[in-house]
Image: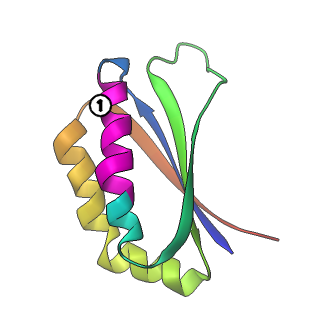
Amino acid sequence: MILYNVTINIDDSVKEEWLQWMKDKHIPDVLATDLPLRYNIYQLLTRFDEETGTTFSIQYFFEEMTSYEIYQQLHAPYLQNEVIKKYDGKFTAFRTVMEEV
């Protein structure tokens, strides 16, 4: 199992709108690619020094690395650009890929 984790810190001024948009639009668009098997979304409760905004972890599960790579090549650039167009300057994100052991 491959876990693709997207950690996003979103400005509190758009947090509720962003979260609803993620649940109603972005995540369904990701799942519609038929490559991730499922997802989880968590709000981090731990805050780091001088951190502003709210941090979320969105986890997408892929059966194998090939599915993840296809997603990255064919779908991720467009879907990530949609987030940038809508919330540019209101978030920071970093991504990690993990393998279940």
Say what amino acid the circle numbered 1 marks. Glu
Residue at position x 35%, y 72% in the image: 32
Main SS of the magenta part reads helix
Q: Is residue 66 above or below residue 44?
A: below
Closer to us: 62 or 32:
32
Residue placed under numbered mark 1 in the picture:
17
Q: Is residue 54 magenta?
A: no
Residue at position x 50%, y 72% in the image: 36
The quarter of the rendered structure image containing the N terminus is bottom right
Res. 88 image quadrant: top left
Closer to us: 22 or 84:
22
The quarter of the rendered structure image containing the C terminus is bottom right
Res. 38 image quadrant: bottom right
Q: Residue furthest bottom?
A: 66
Q: Is residue 30 above or below residue 13?
A: below
| 3 relative to 80 in the view: left or right | right
For the residue carrying disc 1, how many other residues have a C-alpha within 10 Å: few (<14), some (14-19), or many (20+)?
few
| 57 relative to 10 in the view: left or right | right
Q: Residue furthest front?
A: 24
Q: Is residue 3 above or below residue 40?
A: below
Residue 24: x and y, percent?
Answer: 32, 49
Residue 3: x and y, percent?
Answer: 62, 65
Q: Is residue 61 above or below residue 55?
A: below
Residue at position x 53%, y 86% in the image: 66
| Magenta span of residues | 14-27
Could you say whether the residue bearing mark 1 is in a helix, strand or loop? helix
Residue at position x 36%, y 27% in the image: 16
Its colouring scheme is rainbow
Residue 49: x and y, percent?
Answer: 60, 15
